[in-house]
Amino acid sequence: MNDSRNPDEPTARIDQAVASTLADARAADAAAPPAEPVTTRTRSGRRAAIAIGATVVVLGILAVGAVVADGAVRGAIRDEVADQVRAVLDLDPEHPVEVDIAGRSVLWQLATGRFERVHVDAGEIAAGDLTGDLTMSATGIPADRAQTTDRIDARFVVAEGDIAAIAGALSGASIDDVALDGGQIRFRSTLDLLGFPLEVGVGLLPAAVDGALSFTPASLVLGDEELDLESFAEQFGGLGGGLLSAQSVCIAEHLPSGLLLEEVVVEDDALVVSLGADDVALEGPALTERGTC
């Protein structure tokens, strides 16, 4: 029996399939976009990195410049305020005055036209016979100093050892010893009672009265015995002269006229005088002129 099939037929079919597959691949390659060269992608990435780096550097330079400028303006304002404080208090040009500008950036506060808070430490100053440390704090300060500042507070702190300078004037007698205790200024003196020396201890209660420092007798000790002050004053008040009388000390002529005496208290081992002012201009007479007594 003879086989009529062509022995080359399977091979022909394989060749046709391979040809068809190759043709499809060529068509797909033709339809696809050309691949971007590797070098082009690398260059684009480098350019982006350089741009980002340059931006960061520029921002860093601007930030440093802003900090430097802010520091320069802060220093200039501090120096100006310190000079004004020295002038108002009649201090030596070399007297140390520390100024601190609180709050956010000084440039920002200057741009808004108002500073949040300025604190001044004038150190030790003399107010008449009293010597103490003066600190001041102002809030809501306008950049235009002709405008009013919201609030100014001042504290004049007199140490126990410096109270003796006014104790004699307050008592009208020779003072042997001065101490701060129980909210009072206590001093000891010697009185002449019918020809006999009598050691007396008096306690004065400080207060702010009509803009002056007032000191009112509040306790009396003879030897180690405390006496009723009113009874002793009625019987022997004339013996002590001004020892049992209320006395006052004016310090207004040594401070800006706009700073009003608000409170006087004994705190621990110091006499603390608190002053304040509302709505006063830094360049106005309230802070550039002295008060009067």
Image: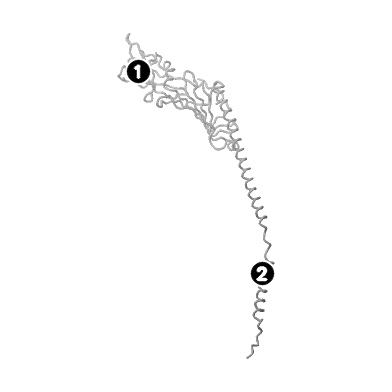
Q: Which disc is residue 163 wearing?
A: none
Q: Secondary structure at mark 2?
A: helix
Distance, label 2 to label 1, CA atoms, is 118 Å
Residue on which the image places disc 2:
25
Q: Nearer the viewer, mark 2 or mark 1?
A: 2
Q: Secondary structure at mark 1?
A: strand
Q: Residue at x 56, y 35 (%)?
A: 115
Q: Quadrant of the N terminus?
A: bottom right
Q: Hey, what amino acid is under mark 2?
A: Ala
Q: Position of residue 216 (x, y in %)?
A: 40, 21
Residue on which the image places disc 1:
201
Q: Position of residue 251 (x, y in %)?
A: 48, 21
Q: Residue furthest front?
A: 1
Q: Hey, what amino acid is under mark 1?
A: Gly
Residue 269 figure quarter: top left
Q: Position of residue 108 (x, y in %)?
A: 59, 38
Task: First in sequence, mark 2 or 1: give its number.
Answer: 2
Circle 1 residues within 10 Å: few <14, some 14–19, many ≥20: many
Q: Position of residue 52 (x, y in %)?
A: 63, 48
